[in-house]
Image: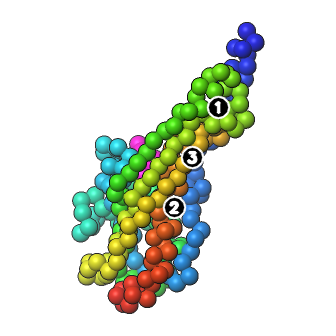
Amino acid sequence: MKKLSLLLVSIVLLLAGCVSIKPSDFQPDFQNANLLPRMDIWFDVPSFQNAYGANSYSEDGSTHPESPYGVGVFLVDSKTKVYTSEKRIQDACNLWVNDVTNNIMDPSRKRTGNIVLRIGNAYKKNNYKWSWLSGLTVGIPNAFGMPMCSNTTELEVIVEIYDMKNQLVAKFNERGTSTTYMAAYYGYYEFQRKAGAEALEDGLTKIKELIHRDFAVINAKLK
């Protein structure tokens, strides 16, 4: 009876502590010193479908028209809803729009091109090495922060920049990684969302450094 009571207490604490990931949790604050001119922002939905093993997407009118950059590549902004069932794809779209708008380009300048985000290879794995300890301790330490498992996500982040004639100006490819732990704070799915967003953010940070390095060349080609 005592063990059962302790188990019930731990479950209540665990459920009470679980929170959802909010879009505001993933707003990159690394801004390039020199911002590129304004560009339309495009998002490759099928590449994220493949990365997360999703089967279908649901778009609204704000994702039209499709682009010359491939089927399922849509013009997006802060109001775009590109996916309904797989939250990690919508998370990625929100993060991408925020990063380009605030940290890569100057929205007040004249539009001079387009910028596209795609995902290449992806690796996602949960590690349950703490599960046996959670079982032995009837989950009590988990309610106070001990992980139940972790998720490692690695994403091949691809960014392409085009001029007004849709000629490729620059292409960057970097790998973003993140390991996030599941404890009382993040629920079973939420910690995977967090890992996905942080992996994308890591890859985009590396790409922003490359854009900064090549700023003069890119800026000249966009004029």
Residue identifier under label 2: 202
**Number of numbered discs visible in the structure rendering:** 3
Check disc 1: other Cα within 10 Å, few if <14, some if 14-19, many if 20+: some
The foreground one among 169 and 110 is 169
Q: Can residue 128 be seen?
A: yes
Residue identifier under label 3: 180
Q: Can residue 100 be seen?
A: no
Q: Is the N terminus in the top left, top right, bottom left or bottom right quadrant? A: top right
- Residue 24 covered by magenta stretch: no
Residue 15, which numbered label? 1
The three-letter amino acid code for the residue at tag 1 is Leu
The three-letter amino acid code for the residue at tag 2 is Asp
Mark closer to the chain start, 1 or 3: 1
Q: Secondary structure at mark 2?
A: helix
Percent position of residue 107, x then y: 48, 79
Mark closer to the chain start, 3 or 2: 3
Percent position of residue 209, x then y: 50, 74
Alpha carbon distance from label 1 to label 3: 18 Å
Q: Which residues are magenta?
A: 84-90
Q: Is the C terminus in the top left, top right, bottom left or bottom right quadrant? A: bottom left
Q: Secondary structure at mark 3?
A: strand
Q: Quadrant of residue 92 in the image?
A: bottom left
The three-letter amino acid code for the residue at tag 3 is Thr
